[in-house]
Image (cartoon, rainbow, N blue to C red):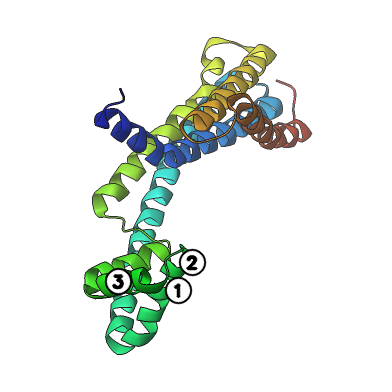
Amino acid sequence: MVSARTLDDAHVEGRWISDLVLGAQDGLVNTLGIVLGVAAASGSVRVTLASGLAASVAEALSMAAVGYTSSLARGELYRSERAREYRHVESAPAAEREEIRVLFAAKGFEGELLDRVVDTVCADKDVWVALMMSEEHHLVDVDHRASLRSTAVIGLASLGGALIPVAPFAAFSGGLASIVSLVVSALGLFALGAYKAKVTTGRRTRSGLVLTAIGLASALVGYAIGAAFGVSP
């Protein structure tokens, strides 16, 4: 038997998957492009490692800031639209009531049952507005704590993803470091794509391959630019 806690944990895990994937993919792909480009241009493992570490930290801080401000913006949008809906319920209740009727009629309610549902919803303005927010605008509230959690997930995921392509330059030298960086990054992208499919929908192998292809294609652009400016070590 599946416990209620197990089901709740699954919902929580899925709730943050978009932040996790966003941060990790962005950090890994961007930093991989940078280290490959710097390695191709400079031929110096020391310079590449320094550039990669600097890029990793900067990327993580930038992504965390973007996650925080975008989360706050979603919350502000929700509250703005909710206030507008309250004004509409006060100023034009007949029109807003008809919108509720249309929503439930589209769900298959009709006749006396539809009338009772509309009466019940519209008897409580808070319920009325909350329903309009979710059904008409498809918006949910985002509080300050949720914004901070989103910031932490995105920032840490970005840093973790960014360090994957950098680490080989601390252990290997020359062209071998670039090759190992490319390989471990490809494996990381595949694992990330497979994990995304596991907690959402889709086939793990397909999702992993798609994310790997997109990530490597983007990162190799950085290598091409570095190679174009390449100098002898």
Determine the secondary structure under disc 1.
helix
On-image quarter of the C terminus: top right
Q: Amino acid at mark 3?
A: Arg
Amino acid bearing label 1: Val
- What is the C-alpha distance between the residues marked 3 and 1? 14 Å
User: What is the CA distance from the residue labelled 1 to the residue labelled 2?
Assistant: 6 Å
Dot in front, 3 or 1: 3
Give the quadrant of the N terminus: top left
In x, y percent, where is residue 61? 40, 42
Would you place residue 26 above or below residue 74 in this image? above
Determine which residue is flagged by label 1: 102
Residue neighbourhood size for the residue with mark 1, other residues' Cα within 10 Å, grouped as few (<14), some (14–19), many (≥20): some
Residue 233 versus residue 207: which sits nearer the camera? 207
Asked if disc 1 and disc 2 are in contact, CB closer than 8 Å, the reply is yes
In the image, is residue 113 above or below residue 84?
A: above
- SS of the residue at dot 3? helix
- Give the residue at mark 3: 116
